[in-house]
Image: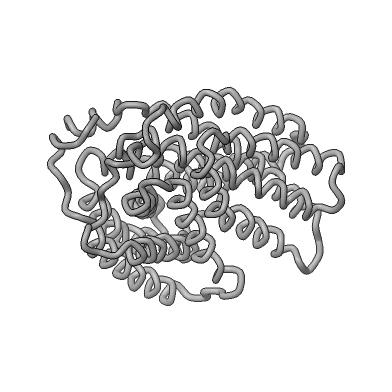
Amino acid sequence: MAGLKNALKSKNIATGWMYFYIHFATEVICFFCLKKQMVTDDSALLWLIPFVYDALAFVPQSVFGYISDRFPKFNAGLTGIILMAFAGLSFWLGILPGRFSAIVVLCAGNALTHVGGAEVTLRSSGGHLAHSAVFVGGGSFGVITGTLLAATSLPYIAVILFLLSAVPFAVCAQKYRYPGADTRELCKDFNYAKKNIPVPVVILVSMLVVAVRAYMGYCLPVAWKTTTLHSALLFITMGAGKAAGGFLADAYGVKKTALVSAAGALPFILLGNRIMVVSLIGIMLFSMTMSITVALNVSVLKGAPGLAFGYSTTALFLGTLPIFFITIKTDLLSNIILSVFTFISFAALAIIIRKDEKISELHY
């Protein structure tokens, strides 16, 4: 328990919570705007809106991350908030021509706030995973909140003002990003990948695990999810699992957490198709590896945490890409895919993650 207590109060953990809120507000406005557009659209190309959003919000994060790495004083999070607020105003007042021009601006803002969160939490964490895990976990809470709010009569201006409440956090968090140390030195304690494995292999394997996890999320058997409350519990559990994965990795070891969560999730997911509590345990375990794959990329790209994070989000898009074109029609096929992909993820993580250090040797 001492390790977990240390993880919960590790240095600069406040950066994770500040970007938890920023990430939450980001997804609230994004999904509020997207769902509003989809509700009013009866065209045959309705599927194109989420496809364009996923592509433009996830893939450019590598480019934005690279730019952010090169220009440490650039506040990507604050810039992203301003862009998303402008996109919201455009949806509301019709400032930009056509809905897709506003979606492009919304996606650019989303990508920038993600990069800002990655830069701040990774650089200030001293090699710990909890900071970035908390930041990433906020997104799931925002997705379900924005989706639910879109079904109400809440005006755009209310959501825009809520987003702008994140501005002080983006300004404050930026002060932790570059405290004067050498850029590479700030991430020197990220040493979770085996040293004898080439850098491109670590990155590609990490991306494979992220892509597999993203696609598995589509295959999850959740026959119990029949109400709005059930949907909310699903997303809350995902967000909590992402955050918990970082704390547990800091407390008990990255490799232990990765392998236990990857293997342990499968039986709960398969057996919990119609039993909500069992399924939610599996989903929480299933969600814990997100911060671990990011940490692996940073371990081999210490001077470029923004780019390292961007590789993970690109893989996230690649993993969701098949869902737009392929439909899984049977539970049996879904279970087979989940089982095979779990084995792939487990084997990949076992190969590239180095042996855990003793908890007493970690820096808090």
> Is 141 on the left-hand or right-hand side of 285?
right
The image position of residue 179, as x and y in percent, is 41, 27
| Residue 67 in sight | yes
Rendered residue at 61%/53% (across/down)? 57
In percent of the image, x 37 and y 54: which residue is there? Answer: 297
Answer with left or right where residue 5 lies relative to residue 65.
left
- Height in image: 136 above or below 104? above
Which of the image's four quarters has the N terminus? Answer: top left
| Front-lying residue, 362 or 94 | 362
- Please provide percent x and percent y for residue 46: 74, 63
Q: Nearer the viewer, residue 74 or 291?
A: 74
Above or below 61: residue 333: below
Using the rendered image of the protein, determine whether residue 281 is visible from the camera's viewpoint: no
Q: From the viewer's perspective, is 295 left or right of 224?
A: left
* Whole-percent x, y for residue 9 in the image: 30, 26
Q: At 49% from the left edge and 53% from the top edge, which residue is drawn?
A: 310
Q: Is residue 310 above or below residue 251?
A: below
Residue 140, percent from left and from top: 51, 44
